[in-house]
Image: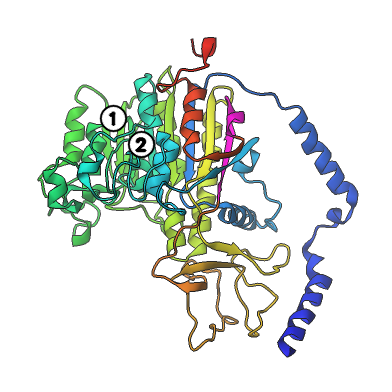
């Protein structure tokens, strides 16, 4: 009872003083009325863009659920010395908004492989499988034969467009792999990761498919070690054995890629100096692999060694947009997800903010009347935005209203993950803990080695030609078909009529 009184008293204090951060003009009802009228007029003035999409610019925030989206908006504003809540993200400006249902064929809550297959290939599938239908069983090579499905990237390439992938993970990771690979296991990065039975049955690793399946013009991310023979020293970390080449078959896929581009201007780079030297105006192909595995988190990135996602997005667009038939580009903020798995909200939100800046760069470099730009997440994470923080309070801070155990808690927490720290029924006292550092791991309700995904719908935001197709609540696999319709690519030519001629 005493704890309840303490909580109630604290809540009254919160209500009494919580508006202290509000701006003076916000106390005037006319401020909100005027703002709403302006927004309403802009919506009334909006005209549908029914052009054929020459270009498709697809931004994927891996694990960027609604909570992450909202929290990243606040962080972006607070990094600019604003209160944050009223900040307008670049992705906030997209006029068409919908929701996508993310479940896979076999699980209520999906992974990045099944979801990527859905929104890129237009077919829902099973957990851990890439570029194949749900007739394929996880890890069973024989079951993938004849069940391969192709992606919007291939459809665009077949239509004569230039295509590319940009990611902050390894280029063999689930999301980028779904653009070009077909595999019963997302974990088959190189042949060294495959069981002998799978190789005997004729399955090939994801890295080798990067070269053999689709002619991709721009490949940017990490994943060097899956491309070179076992024992090949990494150029950046020659003394780190874990960074050395992994392949058992002796193939050097980087050299093979270079030889395949004979007669073309093709650059392979692994550091920022060489990357910056690549002239997009004269470059036909670019493969840039900046790390043995995934790229560094944005907060840890060495700007002298590795370019930002803004820089990689810009380089990719400038190379691809030379094609008069247009382009398809996937840009993945892939480490949002990995930070969430580690329970590190700071890292996840900074990754999401970086992605938003990349989206801004993408809009700056393209024309809205000919470029369909999509922003979405593949799935969400069990991060909650809770308590009663004051307006303008750090999104990485603590709720001023303490819990019934008379201990504070952070505004952002996880339903499960490595942050579970209850000992003898007592939560840790974080009164003197700085929760705003990049290494802080948020508290979690349930102990798991890695935070899981969560299953709620994710936002889909669109602008440009046929953006209105992305409204409403849809199955996730609908996204690929809507993009294809907008750009007049793919096999489905129904109801296009004169529009695609």
Secondary element at image label 2: loop
What is the C-alpha distance between the residues marked 2 and 1? 9 Å
What is the x, y in percent for residue 260?
19, 28
Colouring convention used in this rendered image of the protein: rainbow
Task: Tell me the tag on residue 214.
Answer: 1
Q: Is residue 407 above or below residue 444?
A: below
Secondary element at image label 1: loop
What is the x, y in percent for residue 305?
35, 51
Q: Quadrant of residue 430?
A: bottom right
Please say whether residue 377 is one of the residues in the magenta stretch. Answer: no
Label 1 Cα neighbours within 10 Å, binned few <14 / some 14-19 / many ≥20:
some
Q: Can residue 481 be seen in this view?
A: yes
What is the x, y in percent for residue 71?
60, 57
Q: Name the residue under label 2.
A: 179
Q: In this view, does 282 lie above or below 80?
A: above
Q: Magenta region: which residues?
A: 457-470
Label 2 Cα neighbours within 10 Å, binned few <14 / some 14-19 / many ≥20:
many
> In terms of sequence position, does the residue under pointer 2 or pointer 1 come before the other?
2
The residue lying at 65 percent from left, 85 percent from top is: 406
Does 429 sit left or right of 228 as displayed?
right
Tags 2 and 1 in contact by the CB under 8 Å rule?
A: yes
């Amino acid at each position: 009872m005493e704890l309840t009184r303490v909580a109630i008293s604290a809540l009254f204090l919160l209500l009494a003083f919580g508006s202290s951060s509000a701006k003076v003009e916000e106390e005037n009802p006319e401020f909100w009325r005027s703002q709403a009228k302006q927004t309403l007029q802009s919506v009334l003035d909006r005209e549908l863009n029914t052009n054929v999409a020459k270009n498709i610019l697809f931004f994927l925030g891996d694990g960027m659920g609604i909570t992450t989206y909202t929290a990243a908006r606040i962080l972006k504003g607070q990094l600019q010395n604003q209160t944050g809540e009223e900040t307008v993200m670049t992705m906030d400006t997209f006029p068409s908004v919908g929701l996508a249902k993310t479940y896979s064929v076999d699980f209520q809550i999906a992974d990045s492989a099944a979801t990527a297959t859905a929104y890129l290939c237009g077919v829902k599938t099973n957990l851990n499988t890439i570029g194949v239908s749900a007739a394929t069983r996880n890890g069973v090579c024989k079951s993938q034969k004849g069940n391969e499905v192709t992606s919007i990237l291939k459809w665009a390439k077949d239509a004569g467009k230039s295509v590319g992938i940009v990611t902050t993970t390894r280029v063999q990771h689930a999301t980028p792999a779904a653009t070009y690979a077909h595999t019963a296991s997302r974990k088959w990065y190189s042949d060294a990761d495959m069981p002998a039975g799978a190789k005997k049955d004729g399955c090939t690793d994801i890295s080798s498919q990067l070269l053999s399946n689709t002619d991709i013009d721009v490949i940017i991310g990490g994943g060097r070690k899956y491309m070179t023979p076992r024992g090949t020293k990494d150029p950046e970390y020659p003394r780190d054995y874990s960074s050395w080449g992994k392949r058992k078959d002796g193939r050097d896929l980087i050299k093979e890629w270079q030889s395949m581009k004979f007669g073309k201007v093709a650059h392979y780079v692994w550091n920022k100096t060489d990357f910056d030297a690549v002239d997009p105006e004269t470059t036909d192909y670019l493969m840039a692999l900046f790390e043995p595995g995934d790229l560094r988190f944005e907060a840890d990135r060495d700007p002298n060694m590795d370019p930002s996602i803004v820089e990689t997005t810009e380089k990719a667009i400038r190379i691809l947009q030379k094609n008069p038939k247009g382009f398809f580009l996937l840009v993945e903020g892939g480490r949002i997800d990995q930070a969430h798995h580690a329970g590190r909200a700071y890292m996840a939100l900074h990754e999401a903010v970086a992605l938003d800046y990349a989206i801004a760069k993408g809009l700056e470099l393209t024309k809205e009347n000919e470029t369909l730009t999509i922003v979405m997440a593949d799935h969400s994470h069990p991060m909650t935005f809770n308590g009663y923080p004051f307006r303008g309070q750090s999104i990485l801070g603590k709720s001023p209203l303490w819990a019934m155990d008379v201990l504070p808690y952070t505004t952002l927490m996880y339903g499960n993950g490595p942050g579970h720290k209850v000992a003898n029924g007592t939560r840790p006292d974080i009164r003197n803990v700085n929760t705003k550092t990049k290494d802080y791991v948020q508290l979690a309700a349930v102990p798991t080695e890695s935070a899981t995904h969560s299953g709620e719908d994710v936002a889909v935001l669109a602008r440009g030609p046929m953006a209105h197709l992305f409204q409403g609540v849809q199955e996730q696999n609908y996204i690929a078909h809507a993009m294809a319709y907008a750009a007049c690519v793919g096999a489905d030519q129904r109801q296009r009529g004169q529009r695609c001629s």
